[in-house]
Amino acid sequence: MSATLTINAIDLHYGAAQALKSVSITCKPGRITAVLGRNGVGKSSTLRAITGINTITAGDITFGDEVLGKAPPYRRARMGLGYVPQGREIFPLLTVRENLETGYAGLKRADRTIPAYIFELFPVLKSMLGRRGGDLSGGQQQQLAIGRALVTRPRVLVLDEPTEGIQPSIIKDIGRALQFLRDEKGMTILLVEQFLDFCREIADDIYVMDRGEIQHAGVASDLDRPDIRRHLMV
Ligand SMILES: Nc1ncnc2c1ncn2[C@@H]1O[C@H](COP(=O)(O)OP(=O)(O)OP(=O)(O)O)[C@@H](O)[C@H]1O
């Protein structure tokens, strides 16, 4: 069921400005891959290229043995790409249940249920099903955004800075949830992060970006190396 996500030498431009230069990343099933780097180095652009929100100008992205090509975001979601955007983008006026149900759009009628394991990972969502999304704390909204992505039955889960602005106890819950998805569901997980300790703890493979390029590809323990940390210092 799971699939390898391969980003192969992609470029991305905003007008004349080049944001990504020949970026290559391989995300394997049952592993957590983290992309690290300072503000503005191209991390979110990489994720938006994967989801199809932004169009690449060179290279290709494959999902299993399918080339994504020009597939629009909704088709990528149907192929099994789950996305948790930066800033969460939950619907503030919809209830928690309705937010989760927005994940049904690409599913066959028979699959339109909320898998029970989502409430085991994030019990707060069950107790707040009738509350409006906008009434939740930032951390609860992040759990909701992850839950909504899981409703779509992803094979690959892509998360943009899931710990940003979140309190430590909820960061721990999110870390445990990602480890569960990796270990028990064999999911392919790619996350962009600036929080090094979080990556050191839960990531398997890491990529360090600087100025639109991958500067280092390795394993999480490389984050202890001074030459790698140098790329990450503000
Ligand atoms: N829509 C856009 N139009 C023009 N330039 C953009 C756009 N989005 C991003 N950029 C530029 O592209 C570069 C990479 O931005 P990107 O958001 O991918 O970086 P990032 O590493 O995710 O940073 P952050 O952590 O701040 O989100 C930056 O120079 C940024 O200013």
Image (tube, helix red, strand yellow):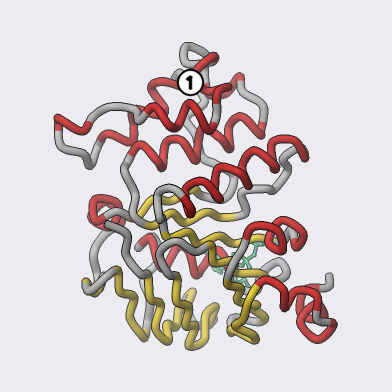
Q: Is residue 165 above or below residue 31?
A: above
Residue 71 horizontal side relative to residue 213, left or right: left
Identify which residue is drawn at 35% across, 69% down: 4
Q: Is residue 157 above or below residue 206?
A: above
Tell me where residue 85 appears, x and y as whole percent. Answer: 51, 49
Q: Which residue is under mark 1?
A: 93
In this view, the residue farthest toward the left is 109
What is the total number of numbered labels drawn onto the structure image?
A: 1
Q: Quadrant of the N terminus?
A: bottom left
Crowd band around label 1 with a 10 angstrom C-alpha radius: few (<14), some (14–19), many (20+) = few
Q: Amino acid at mark 1?
A: Leu
Residue closer to the observer: 70 or 164: 164
Tell me where residue 37 appears, x and y as whole percent. Answer: 69, 71
Tell me where residue 179 appears, x and y as whole percent. Answer: 55, 50
Residue closer to the observer: 204 or 153: 204
- Mark 1 and ligand 1: say if the CB distance to the nearest ligand atom is below 8 Å: no
Which quarter is ligand 1 in? bottom right
Callout 1: SS: loop
Tell me where residue 50 appears, x and y as whole percent. Answer: 40, 66
Identify which residue is drawn at 45% across, 62% down: 48
Residue closer to the observer: 57 or 71: 71
Q: Quadrant of the C terminus?
A: bottom right
In this view, the residue farthest toward the top is 130
Identify which residue is drawn at 51% across, 68% down: 45
Quadrant housing residue 214? bottom right
In this view, the residue farthest toward the front is 184
Quadrant housing residue 87? top right
